[in-house]
Amino acid sequence: MQIIPEIAARRAALTAIRHDIHAHPELGFEEHRTAALVATELERCAIEVHRNIGKTGVVGVLKRGQSSRCIGLRADMDALPISEAADHAHRSTHAGCMHACGHDGHTAMLLGAAAHLAERGEFDGTLVFIFQPAEEGRGGAAAMIADGFFERFPVQQVFGMHNWPGMALGRFGVTPGPVMASADRFDITITGHGGHAAMPHLTIDPVVAGAALVTALQSVVSRNTDPLDSAVLTVTRFNAGDAYNVIPHTATLCGTTRALRPAVREATWQRLLRVCDGVAAAYGVKIEARLNAGGYPPTVNTVAEARLCREVASALVGAAQVDWDLPPSMGAEDFSHFLEHRPGCYVWIGNGPGEGGCTLHNPRYDFNDDNLVLGASYWVKLAEHLLPPA
């Protein structure tokens, strides 16, 4: 590996930052302590700091030379509402909240890169370090964009990175095109006519209609979607009634839909509505389906930027250690909102085997500290590659 020696010398400091953030996790739009830590570290390096972008986001700006080129490098800061089960010294001190996805490591890696680039970076142009809040379902990227991110920081390309358990340490994964799916949440209300459980013929049972609807919705993907297109429709909640001898008046279903292409995303929703109409007619109930605002679009890497990232990662760890054109994940990522506005690429960095529950969103997960130096070195080499000195 072509690790940058000066970054390797900072390993203990980067680890301390990561452990501090891990011990004090904060949920989306509540990252006040984390944002303050990030701002302090950037200011220590004489990087221009902008606070409260998209509520709790932080942006650092570093200019050098005369070039008008401007690129964005993004890390996420928020934690998850999970109680940590691991017993390491830096375990969460906040009950019911932990960094179970590695955003503490992502933040520390980008801070390490920012510090090196401020002190020793050889580049010509403007670097924008994006520390985003609320990635975990609360729409932090969209909030930053609505707050005028692209008008205030006119980046021409934007890049992200996420650790990936199950991929060996020292490996990178780069996928041109769709790399993660869209994610949309839906709520369905079924209204019938409640009554006595002993006299079902005098009722219109929303539970029976709901059960039929759950089954019928499975056909949206299995029978209405091209097998060559990836899509998922999952009902995750079914609530109805609270007594043994009462047929309830209403039932509610909740779930998510996911797709890798915008057209499939929209078609899946329209097919869901049609199935709801059909079940309503068949069972004599009223069905209302609502798609929640704030869904995430597919994360789609532009091909040219993906090739640039592969080139940089190959120079860092060797071409044999870079997986190209990996199958996309049906998970979602709101970095997708940035990629809707600018070309860019979202890469995977291996986090190790994921043994002992060390997988994403698991209560025993922990970011691999051996990645801090590698990830920071990748960011530096990418920045210098994209903004070569005059």
Image: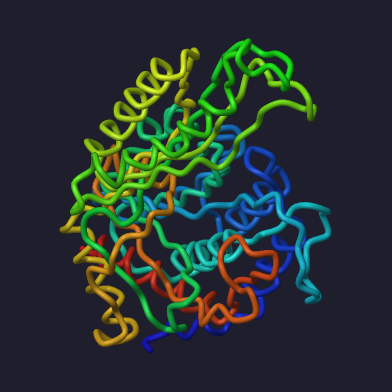
Q: Answer above or below: position of 79 versus 265.
A: below
Q: Which of 115/187 is in front?
A: 187
For residue 221, what is the image quadrant?
Answer: top left
Q: Left or right? Give the position of 274 relative to 239.
A: left
Q: Answer above or below: position of 57 versus 318.
A: above
For residue 120, what is the image quadrant?
Answer: bottom left
> Residue at point 64% right, 18% down?
200
Q: Which of 351/343 is in front?
A: 351
> Residue at point 49% right, 12% down?
286
Q: Position of residue 195 (x, y in %)?
A: 70, 13
Q: Position of residue 53 (x, y in %)?
A: 54, 35
Quick one: quadrant of the C terminus?
A: bottom left
Q: Answer above or below: position of 336 versus 356.
A: above
Q: Left or right? Give the position of 193 relative to 278.
A: right
Q: Position of residue 119 (x, y in %)?
A: 48, 68
Q: Which of 107/274 is in front?
A: 274
Quick one: quadrant of the N terminus?
A: bottom left
Q: Is residue 70 visible?
A: no
Q: Left or right? Give the position of 191 relative to 267.
A: right
Count of labels in the image: 0
Q: Is residue 270 visible?
A: yes
For residue 107, what is the image quadrant?
Answer: bottom right
